[in-house]
Structures are given as structure tokens and as C-alpha cells.
Amino acid sequence: MVCVDGCEPDYLAQAVSAGVMPWLKRVLKTGTHTIAHCVVPSFTNPNNLSIVTGVPPVQHGICGNYLFDPETQTEVMMNDPKWLKAPTILKALADSGVRVGVVTAKDKLRRLLGYQMNGICFSSEKAAEVTLEENGISDVLGMVKMPVPDVYSAQLSEFIFAAGVELFSRNLIDVAYLSTTDYIQHKHAPGTAGANAFYEMLDKYMARLEALNVTIAITADHGMNAKTALDGSPNVIYLSDVLKTIPGADRARVILPITDPYVVHHGALGSFATVYLDKSTNQLAEIARVLQSIQGIEVVLTREEAAKRFELPADRLGDLVIVSERFTVLGSEASRHDLTGLDAPLRSHGGISEQQVPLILNHRYPKQANHQYRNFDAFDWVLNHDL
């Protein structure tokens, strides 16, 4: 099971057309494929956890990379398993005697994906620090024969694929979950040399896995789009600055669920935000109306509306949820976002516009006509395919 972070379907279409993905070109003819939907917010943590639990965030509880904890009145990362409400398919497989291996790019996901799972679980980011007790394996660097990659590199994802090939070829696992980083997708548009080089690399590793008689399903946690103005600058609505001009909203708290420790390539700017209003405010409807009128805002929803529409846990959302349009991202205050690390036009995700993702299987699957599949149908495809 491969989750290609940020894999807008056009990346695959462009790479196949360019002739750099011969394995995938064949699989698209002989296997099964469709355009699926990811969950909204279209961020890493909610979607990876939906894929490995098989349910939407309202059931597993992970509704972003980052949230406001009302109990402690603090903003925290959602990488602690305490936020997880549902068991994973990976744990269930391991409990039934299946040998499971999980390899992810960044360590932020490792603890959630491997929660209570008896098996191999490590990140390429921390591959030099693995122990048998903590990760179920030792000397990963010796096995993969690659140095620890830079966290901002394509090699961080390549290390995952190389590890997957080694784990299968050494007969250490029966099932793998391989989850990459979207560094390349944030930096390179579909069809560009940088993007095609990444997908050419992916294609070669998929061919090596298939040669080991491995059934392969590929999906993505979210898509990716350019978020720029006509001059190429980031197209940002800074919500905190806007809210200060609206009566009754000047003390609002803006939470950007895209936030994580790795902001160089996106500046903590995504297309989904949640707003906590001051408890004394009784102008929610008027504040929502003003925000909805802003060019670049796709939809403004109340907590209850957003929870119902996107299948999210209401107790982990603010009073309002704001989703921006395809070419627009949301920030808090302009002064709080360091964009000096952006050395290419901004590409990001989080909204409804990044909901379309590929879902591919290298075998036949009895796909239903006119059915909207979701990325968390992937384990059903890979485990219950028709041989």
C-alpha cells in the first residue's frame, strides 16, 4: 500500500505521457484505476489515518496536522496517538499474525501509523536512530545502503521505496504501508523535469516490488495546486488581519491545520482554516457573511455544518471553518508567516480543490460503475482484489 503524498492525478498523466513510467502505463491497462476523493481538510495526517483505519476523521479523530486544544487552551501538533479514536487496519493485520512493515518519510506520522502495532515501523527521517525495541528492526541504513536523506529532498521518499523492496526481498514482511513526503509536489508542477524525475524513480521501484510478486495499491493523501497571483507571488488571505477589521471578531484565534515543523516549502499556508471566536461574540452569522464575501474564499461553514459536510469531529473544530478556492491559500497574520524559504512559486493544498487523488491497483478489482471511491478504500482494493 503506497501513499504518494501530494499526488495530484495530473502528475501521473504527465509522467506517463512523457514515457517515464512504463510500469504504470502497463498497469493502467491491465490493472484497475479510478480518480478517488481524499478527505477534507486535504492534509497529510487526516488522510493517512483515514487510509490506515478505513474510516473518515469523524471516526478516527485526526482532523489536521495541528489543532487548538480547548482543555489546555494551547495549540498543539496532532502527532500524539492520544488523539486517535479508532484502531488501524495495520494493527488488526499484525494482531492476526500478518507481518506488517510501515515506512514513512517524516517521523511526525510514525507514532500514529504504528500505534499499538506489533511489527516494523520507522521513518526515513530518523532511519539512523532505529532500535529493535522501538521500531521492530535495527540497522536500517545497512539494509537500505543509503545515507539518511535530507528532509527537504526527493531522496527522503526514495529511501522509503528502497526500504520496502529490501523488506520484501528479505522476506521480513507480508504487508507494507509506504507513505512519502510531498516536498517535490510542493516545488514542481506536473510535467516539469523535477516532477517527472520523481515519478520515474517511483515507477522503477514499483516494478521492482511487482517482480517480487507483491500486490501494489497506490493512492495519495491529497492533491496539490499552484496558489499564486498572476505575478507569481503567493495568493494569500491573511485571516487574522481580516478578522481584526470585523466587529466582534477582533479577538478571534485562527488555526491553520497544515502547520507542522516542516514549513520551508509551504510557509504554513494551506486552503483550510478554522476560527475560534471570543465566547462573548454573538455575531457569528455576520462574521461568516463578511468572510464569505471575500474573493478567493470558496465556502464558510459553522462548526456543525463543516462536521457534517466533511465528516469531521465537531469537538476539534473552531466556531467557523473556512475553505479557500483553488488558487488561494489562507494564513493567520502576515507577520507570522516566513516565506523567505520559498524559492519557487507556492504550491499547496488543504481545500476541496485538492480532493481528487489517484487510486490504482496492479491487479483486477471488481470496481463498481458510477461509484465515488475514496482514498481510504485502498486497503480493500489491495487486500480483497480478484486474483
Image: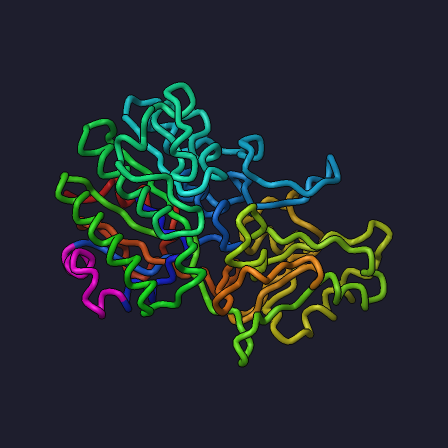
Residue 347, horizontal then vertical, whole percent: 48, 65
Residue 197, horizontal then vertical, whole percent: 28, 60
Q: Quick check: 385 above or below 114?
A: below
**Residue 72 appears left or right of 176:** right
Give the quarter of the image for residue 289: bottom right
Task: Name the image quarter holding the N terminus.
Answer: top left
**Residue 295 appears left or right of 61:** right
Region in magenta: 15-30
Which is more toward the observer, 234 or 150?
Answer: 150
263 drawn magenta: no
Task: Name the image quarter holding the C terminus.
Answer: top left
As drawn, the residue found furthest toward the bottom would be: 230
Give the quarter of the image for residue 26: bottom left
Q: Quick check: 215 above or below 282?
A: above
User: What residue lies at 87% left-to-right and 52% top-to-bottom?
Assistant: 280
Which is more toward the observer, 161 or 94?
Answer: 161
User: What residue lies at 40% left-to-right and 65% top-to-bottom?
Assistant: 188
**Residue 249 appears left or right of 351:** right
Residue 282, horizontal then vertical, whole percent: 84, 57
